[in-house]
Amino acid sequence: MKQLLNILSVITRRWASKSPKRYKWVTNISLILGVILAGVSFTPLGLPVWAITLIGYVSTFLVLLSGGSKLTTTDNEIIKETKKILKTENK
């Protein structure tokens, strides 16, 4: 349980920390496109099933990409803490 709380603490600190400029751009663009595509997939446009399925997969990928790039940080202290937690978890 303590390990899980440590992981959640690091994720929370990573989310609140400052991201590099390139990753901020990736976060914003992919989140906006993902939300737009998700909105399109729920509107009754009469698109074929394969198109709706593809839009769903692409929007999910973009939102996950956005979350992953948001967790990227330049804070060395958080990076060291993350490596420490992951190293002890693999033993």
Image (tube, helix red, strand yellow):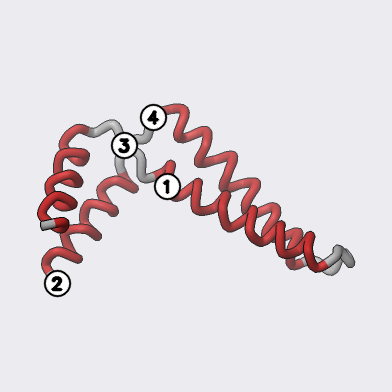
Give the structural element (helix, strand or loop) at label 1. helix
Residue 22: where, in percent of width, then height?
47, 28
Amino acid identity at mark 2: Met
Disc 4 to disc 3: CB gap under 8 Å: no
Question: Closer to the N terminus: mark 3 or mark 1?
Answer: 1
* Residue for point 10% across, 54% down: 88
Per the rendering, the mark at residue 20 is 4
Q: Residue furthest bottom?
A: 1
* Residue with the mark numbered 1: 68
Relative to 30, residue 19 above or below? above
- Name the residue that disc number 2 marks: 1
Say few, some or many: other residues with alpha carbon within 10 Å of mark 3 (under 14 / 14 to 19 / 20 or more).
Answer: some
Mark 2 to mark 3: distance in Å? 25 Å
Mark 2 closeness class: few <14, some 14–19, many ≥20 residues within 10 Å: few
Q: Position of residue 20 (x, y in %)?
A: 38, 29
Q: Secondary structure at mark 4?
A: loop
Cα–Cα span, label 2 and label 4 = 32 Å
Q: Quadrant of the C terminus?
A: bottom left
For badge 3, the amino acid type reads: Thr
Compared with 16, 25 (above or below) is above
